[in-house]
């Protein structure tokens, strides 16, 4: 999405100021990479006791019992992945659709106004989302949406069991609202960079409006949209406060979206302050390390996937 | 316009100067503490009232949770700690210097619920309570509940258990009680600031629990007494070991503390849940300040003055905020403990 002018081959023209500035920037970017390594190192050091005691069972075991000092992170791993997936599944098509509408179809004035409002969503603190989740979203889900799902779609494992309003579905919905501005804003900026001539070319060839959007807008910004979705996913994976307030915080793997669950970020936020035993603390730090790895892996995979797609 | 700006700048300058002078002349001793969130409303009141009388002291308190308080205190990064659950022998052994527990007030954990048509006063025995939280009693019209509460009409709603999702001293007190009254609970779940709950929804903080209960008909959960009183939640009467149904109030909670006057260990680390005394509310506990048994002259003197003040004058503020005061016999004993704190000459750092 960005293009850099190629580096000048001769260095004769380099001035001292340029040199200092370039070194400074290089130092800063190196420092950033180093910071990543240092964070990983300290997390791993803090988690050492837990890693050496539980080994792989920490990831595969689904019991989280601070009293018996048995720690398995499978349920929270599951909770993080599922809630973020729900969020992306809802938010990605929605935000891209909004971006297409506001950039291609809507009158510019309306586009600007609505775009501004959506961007404002990003400015709402997550604890406010959480409160809204508890007092508006969850009661609505419990009294209207979930009875309907349970009655009509109860035969699908996704919608079985008792419902409470709070739970995986509520967490996924809250997260989807929270990541819409991220995906929307970036997608729209990408659409803006597409030259008008490209659109006109498609129309000149006899494309309908939809075909024009498909050919000259969506196809050519595929990799950029992918990047926007990843950024949104990244935010969903790490979101703590709002999720903690609406997910119900039960550490178990349940296929039903109506059931309460827990995420990695929320278990850390919940238990860190009052963790009294060393192994409990270490287990929580290991969860932090796992979250770090999961985020890193998902980002890496997504990037590779996008790179391949855009090369095709 | 320009004149206005210069006047404004002048005022700012004077204000800044005043601040600088104020800071430099104020030689108040800074005392840092951290720990329990449960007594925080009371402690912040105490510190501000105490500073009004003793303006040579400035006390900073951060309510980071009991666990964090213990960790920071044993690491010597703060002057005093605060905790809702006494330190374990293991934790005490890890501390490089001996630690003294000073009980300050008594707190209670109350059961609060959302049952349309049933106000404060739902009667619950310890067995029923344990089975509710174990997930064994699933509906409100269960005969074990209805027989205990004649005259009340119960909804057919399923029971929804609401508990704290965050680690908390409140949870520790409640699970300590359940472990004492139910063998099943003791073996399956146990006692702790965070436990492996058999069932239910987790809310973050007292407000999270209360919020979930308010939203869910048929919900029951536990919060601190202070929180339930201030927010006018429906509170259950719990059957104590003398077969009386007791509502939590300052009197019944202080009585729970009085039940252990005879058996009180010298370090005050004792659980007062399920007390064997008539009229005592069964789910309550001391909350403690943690101090070192020897402190440097300047800070130590001030901390000692504060501790004496807290368990004397401070107790009045406690009652206004729904914390139960220490029984009077205990206050004498705690005063003697405070007097035993040694002061060492100032180190020249």
Image (tube, coloured by chain):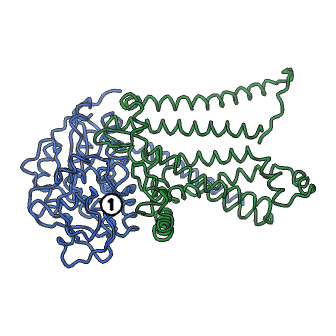
Chain colours: A green, B blue
Does A269 sit above or below residue A166?
above
Does B294 sit above or below residue A221?
above
* Secondary element at tag 1: strand
Residue B23 x %, y %: 45, 45
Kindly identify which chain the residue marked by label 1 belongs to.
Answer: B
Does B188 sit above or below residue B8?
above
Residue B296 x %, y %: 27, 34
Does the rendering let one see residue B29?
A: no
Of all residues, the one furthest to the left in this rendering is B262
Camera-side residue of B83 and A53: A53
Camera-side residue of A228 and B277: A228
List the residue tagged with mark 1: B161
Left or right, residue A136 beside residue B138: right
* Occupied quadrant, residue B259: bottom left
Residue B238 x %, y %: 19, 64
Of all residues, the one furthest to the front in this rendering is A155
Of all residues, the one furthest to the right in this rendering is A204
The residue at 65%/48% (across/down) is A229
Q: Quadrant of the C terminus of chain B?
A: top left
Q: Quadrant of the N terminus of chain B?
A: bottom right
The residue at 44%/42% (across/down) is B24
Left or right, residue A180 beside residue A219: left
Count the marks: 1
Left or right, residue A283 beside residue B46: right
């Amino acid at each position: 999405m960005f293009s850099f002018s190629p580096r000048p081959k001769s260095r004769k023209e380099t001035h001292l100021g340029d040199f200092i500035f370039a070194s400074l920037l290089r130092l800063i970017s190196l420092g950033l990479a180093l910071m990543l390594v240092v964070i990983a190192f300290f997390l791993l050091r803090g988690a050492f006791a837990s890693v050496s005691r539980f080994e792989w069972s920490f990831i595969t075991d689904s019991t989280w019992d601070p009293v018996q000092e048995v720690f398995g992170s499978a349920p929270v791993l599951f909770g993080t992945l599922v809630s973020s997936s729900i969020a992306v599944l809802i938010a990605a098509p929605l935000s891209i659709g909004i971006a297409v509408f506001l950039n291609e179809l809507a009158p510019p004035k309306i586009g600007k106004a609505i775009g501004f409002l959506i961007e404002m969503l990003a400015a709402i603190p997550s604890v406010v989302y959480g409160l809204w989740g508890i007092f508006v979203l969850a009661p609505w889900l419990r009294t209207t949406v979930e009875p309907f799902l349970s009655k009509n779609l109860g035969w699908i494992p996704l919608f079985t069991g008792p419902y409470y309003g709070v739970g995986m579905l509520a967490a996924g919905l809250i997260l989807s609202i929270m990541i819409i501005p991220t995906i929307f804003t970036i997608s729209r900026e990408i659409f803006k960079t597409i030259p008008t001539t490209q659109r006109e070319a498609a129309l000149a060839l006899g494309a309908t409006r939809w075909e024009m959007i498909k050919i000259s807008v969506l196809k050519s910004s595929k990799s950029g949209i992918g990047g926007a979705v990843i950024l949104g996913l990244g935010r969903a994976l790490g979101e703590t406060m709002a999720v903690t307030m609406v997910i119900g915080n039960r550490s178990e793997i349940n296929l039903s979206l109506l059931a309460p669950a827990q995420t990695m970020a929320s278990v850390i936020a919940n238990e860190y302050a009052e963790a009294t035993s060393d192994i409990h603390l270490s287990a929580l730090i290991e969860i932090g390390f796992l979250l770090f790895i999961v985020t890193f892996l998902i980002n890496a995979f997504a990037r590779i996937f996008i790179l391949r797609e855009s090369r095709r | 316009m320009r004149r206005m700006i210069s006047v404004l700048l002048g005022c700012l300058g004077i204000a800044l100067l005043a601040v600088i002078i104020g800071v430099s002349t104020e030689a108040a001793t800074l005392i840092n503490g951290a720990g329990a969130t449960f007594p925080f409303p009371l402690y912040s009141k105490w510190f501000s009232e105490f500073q009004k009388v003793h303006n040579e002291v400035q006390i900073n308190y951060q309510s980071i949770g009991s666990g964090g308080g213990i960790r920071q205190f044993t690491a010597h990064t703060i002057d005093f700690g605060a905790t809702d659950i006494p330190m374990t022998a293991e934790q005490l052994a890890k501390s490089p210097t001996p630690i003294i527990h000073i009980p300050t007030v008594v707190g209670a954990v109350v059961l609060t619920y959302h049952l349309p048509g049933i106000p404060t006063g739902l009667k619950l025995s310890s067995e029923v309570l344990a089975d509710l939280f174990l997930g064994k009693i699933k509906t409100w019209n269960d005969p074990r509940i209805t027989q205990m509460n004649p005259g009340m009409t119960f909804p057919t709603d399923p029971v929804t258990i609401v508990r704290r999702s965050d680690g908390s001293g409140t949870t520790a007190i409640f699970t300590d009680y359940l472990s004492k009254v139910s063998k099943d609970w003791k073996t399956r779940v146990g006692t702790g600031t965070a436990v492996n709950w058999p069932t239910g929804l987790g809310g973050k903080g007292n407000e999270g629990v209360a919020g979930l209960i308010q939203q869910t008909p048929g919900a029951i959960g536990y919060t601190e007494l202070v929180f339930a009183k201030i927010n006018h939640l429906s509170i259950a009467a719990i059957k104590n070991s003398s077969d009386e149904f007791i509502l939590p109030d300052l009197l019944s909670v202080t009585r729970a503390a009085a039940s252990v006057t005879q058996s009180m260990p010298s370090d005050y680390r004792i659980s007062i849940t399920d007390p064997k005394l008539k009229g005592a509310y069964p789910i309550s506990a001391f909350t403690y300040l943690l101090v070192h048994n020897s402190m440097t002259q300047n800070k130590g003197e001030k901390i000692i003055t504060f501790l004496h003040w807290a368990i004397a004058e401070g107790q009045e503020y406690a009652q206004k905020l729904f914390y139960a005061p220490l029984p009077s016999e205990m206050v004498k004993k705690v005063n003697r403990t405070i007097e035993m704190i040694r002061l060492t000459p100032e180190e020249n750092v």
